[in-house]
Image (tube, helix red, strand yellow):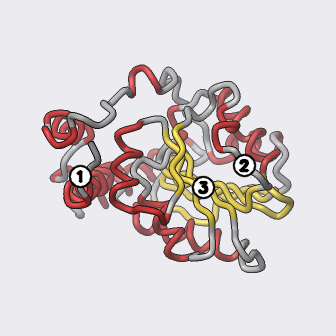
Amino acid sequence: MSMSTAVAAQWVERWEDQQQRYAIDREERFTVIADVVEHVSRDCTAPLIVDLGSGPGALAARLAARLPTAVVLAVDADPLLLELGRAHYGSALRYVEAMIGAPGWLDALALDRPLDAAVSTTALHYLGEGTLRAVYRELAERLRPGGVFVNGDHINPDSAAIHDLAREIGRRRSERCQAHAREDWQSWWAGATADPELSALPARTGERRHPHCEGNDLSVSAHVELLRGGGFRHAGAVWQFGNSHVLVAVR
């Protein structure tokens, strides 16, 4: 049974709305990430880009729209989210089911040439430090010289005092934007799994398919150290609001 585009649009719209509960600045992050990728890909005729932990593919779709000659892979471990993306965004993206950080996870992408860019947003914080170190190293090995890894996420400032202030600034912005009036993650999944139009599609299998949520509490400088140790020549933040950062690492 295939999913109708109308049903997919409904659930993707709800997904994007609930994601903004947790990252009210999500669209600005997407724009910054797309700006970086567009800049480093300006001399590429068909840039090869992967979006890690893509969900249905919101960021990947924006990159494909910004760079119409690019090949964009949306990579996620959840088959339902990937199927929603396929039905909603269509052939603009290539969808790949893979568990980021698992042994040999990059092989599932079947890359036939070096990457020009790898991006992620609000997805890699569940990885432990050791797993993240390995993922950074593996990405550096697959990127071309001058290629970039771009990550938008909640990342702690180096100073504990600044971290507390940044978190408070972010909390106040979310409050002003009424972020907590939006649907939450659990409610979205409860609705999706109860929808009869989705019942014949791959079920949510997050507990089985995703690695154990080790999580990390790394600061900006700790991420930079891991990236440099993994083979990136340069790394640093290019955008920040509160404790929300966009980090860029150049191979």
> Disc 3 to disc 1, how far (Cα)?
23 Å
Lower position in the chain sequence, tag 3 or tag 2: 2
* Category of crowding for the residue at label 1, using alpha-carbon neighbours closer than 10 angstroms: few (below 14), some (14–19), many (at least 20): many
**Mark 1 = which residue?**
11
In this rendering, the label closer to the viewer, 3 or 1: 1
What residue is drawn where x is 63% and y is 26%?
Answer: 102
Look at the picture and state if 95 lies above or below 134. Answer: below
Q: Are the residues at dot 3 and dot 2 in contact (C-beta closer than 8 Å)?
A: no
Q: Mark 3 vs mark 2: give the one in front.
A: 2
Q: Nearer the viewer, residue 41 or 123?
A: 41
Name the residue that disc number 3 marks.
119
- The amino acid marked with disc number 1 is Trp
Crowd tier of the residue under label 2, counting other residues whose Cα lies within 10 Å: few below 14, some 14–19, many 20 or above: few
For residue 83, say whether it is visible.
yes
Residue drawn at 51 percent across, 49 percent down: 95
Q: Nearer the viewer, residue 214 or 203?
A: 203
Secondary element at tag 2:
loop
Residue 138, image x, y percentages? 76, 39
Separation (CA) of disc 3 from disc 2: 15 Å
- Residue 124 disc label: none
Choose the circle earlier in sequence order: 2 or 1: 1
